Image (spheres, grey):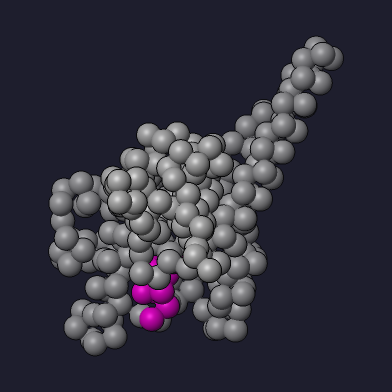
Amino acid sequence: MQERVWRIGEVAAVAKVSIRALRHYDAIGLLRPSFRSEAGYRLYTPADLARLQQVLFFRELGMGLAQIRRIMTDPAFDTGRALRRQRDLLNEKARHTNALAGVVDRALEALEKGEEMDTRDMFEVFGEFDPGKYEAEAEERWGGTEAYAQSARRTKRYTKDDWKQIQAEGAEITAAFVKALDRGLTPEDPAVQALVERHWTYLERWFYTPTPEMYAGLGDLYVNDPRFTENIDREREGLAAYQRDAMRVFATARRTGKE
């Protein structure tokens, strides 16, 4: 039985996107139709439609096309894993939206009563660092390791001020990576590797002592998990992949003793 195909106008209608957008996705290699008719018309298969759905999910999460293309063309890209990540991201987005709505309700209530909102309530929901955001997933991935147990013991004792300091130090390291990338330094550059060592020490001081394999795996996670990629690339397009490559170099040096 011959597989059904859709022409570009039909895809645009069913997916509620413009023909122009589909042509652009084709031009940049994000979504290329599997076939062309003898007359040159684009013909999309069910697999192409499933890929388009992935693209639109990522778009709903606020990702740019360059970032989506990088994620979906990665050899390690897995559709099932991506769907689960997208579901988690959408749930997080919904929780954040509900939290914002709650703040609006409290602001309205204070306004109607002629009262002032507590300043902590006014701004608590904006940009708050949540150290437990990936706790369940971290336990699933690394729950049986000594590193996870070590991190759990340490972080349980941390206060809100500790987390603010952790966030500030992490932001400084990220800013330094952005400067290195903007300067055109390669991941192998000694200055970049010194920065990676600073990142390694940061993890060791606040969370756990990583093995080279674990550290390289963390770098892979920066690229393979859309949540990490979105957060990191928000600072600079391509930063997640840049950090991943630099961390791989460092981890290899650690394994071989050629630091």
Q: Position of residue 250 (x, y in %)?
A: 27, 73
| Residue at screen point 57% across, 55% down | 86
| Residue at screen point 37% across, 58% down | 34
In the image, taking residue 172 as reference, residue 109 lies left or right, namely right
Q: Is residue 66 visible?
A: no
* The furthest residue to the right: 113
Where, by quadrant of the figure, is residue 83 drawn? bottom right
In front of the other: 187 or 72: 72
Q: Quadrant of the C terminus?
A: bottom left
In front of the other: 198 or 128: 128
- The secondary structure making up most of the magenta span is helix
In the image, taking residue 187 as reference, residue 230 lies left or right, namely right
Q: Is residue 21 visible?
A: yes
In the image, taking residue 68 as reference, residue 247 lies left or right, namely left
Q: Position of residue 16 (x, y in %)?
A: 54, 37
| Total tally of numbered discs in the picture | 0
Position above or below: 138 against 129: below
Magenta stretch bounds: 213-221
Position above or below: 196 against 69: below
In front of the other: 110 or 227: 227
Asked if residue 215 lies in the magenta stretch, the reply is: yes
In the image, taking residue 85 as reference, residue 28 lies left or right, namely left
| Residue at screen point 49% across, 44% down | 11
Q: Position of residue 57 (x, y in %)?
A: 53, 48
* The furthest residue to the bottom: 256
| Residue at screen point 56% across, 41% down | 14
In front of the other: 86 or 216: 86
Asked if residue 40 lies in the magenta stretch, the reply is: no
